[in-house]
Image (cartoon, rainbow, N blue to C red):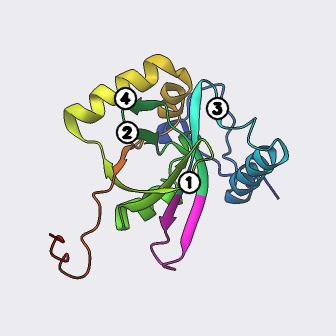
Amino acid sequence: MFYEPKLLTRREGWRAGYPAFMPSDRLFRAMNATHRALIALTGGRVGWTVLRMPVLELTTTGRRSGRPRSLMLTAPVVEGERLVVVASRGGDPAHPAWFLNVKANPRVMVALGGREAVPMVAHIAEGEERDRLWRRITRDHQNYADYQTRTARRIPVVVLAPAAAPAPPYPAAPAAV
């Protein structure tokens, strides 16, 4: 079943007019598979932008399994090489699994617009940084403000920044003269 009812009360953050269920994990996985299929079927010509936001493929390390876990996300804010993603899960009361994986291991791989994946480091925006990003996100993309009204949890904002080049495992050879 793609919709597993999760009955919620208004006290849990649901406002009047929203359905009293959240899509199941299976539905989210099916949506990701459909998105990937669309990109594959069109040779990457369609699917790398959704609602005026670039789409990225985020690969995390499973916090329990240690295995790579990939999913498609939108980046409502791009600041130079930094990408900002939102752990909204559509306003669900629980954090998305990818966010929990990032908390456990912030080293991720990110493929933007179908390009080759690059190593990045995730950090959870806090304080003024989060407030500034959240204002910008909700100004440009009202759906995120709507998601926040559906849940009592504070929706996390995650910044993905390029990882520093890893140091070689051995001392560099002296330059030839």
- Residue type at mark 2 is Glu
Q: Which numbered mark, 3 or 1, is in the foreground of this view?
A: 1
**Residue found at x 71% / y 37%:** 47
Q: Which numbered mark, 3 or 4, is in the foreground of this view?
A: 3
Highlighted magenta segment, given as a residue range? 59-70
Question: Residue 39: x, y in percent?
Answer: 76, 45
Q: Which residue is mark 1?
A: 116
CA–CA distance in space, label 3 to label 2: 17 Å
- Mark 4 crowdedness (10 Å alpha carbons): few <14, some 14-19, many ≥20: many
Which residue is more in the foreground, 172 or 37?
Answer: 172
Specify whether 170 is left or right of 44: left
**Residue found at x 34% / y 29%:** 133
- Mark 1 crowdedness (10 Å alpha carbons): few <14, some 14-19, many ≥20: few
User: Is residue 115 placed above or below 146 in the rendered structure?
Assistant: below
Q: Would you say the residues marked 4 and 1 are in contact, meaning their CB atoms lie under 8 Å apart?
A: no
User: SS at mark 4?
Assistant: helix
Based on the displayed image, in which of its 4 quarters is residue 136 positioned? top left
**Mark found first going from the N terminus, 2 or 4:** 2
Give the numbered dot on residue 49: 3
Q: Which numbered mark, 3 or 2, is in the foreground of this view?
A: 2
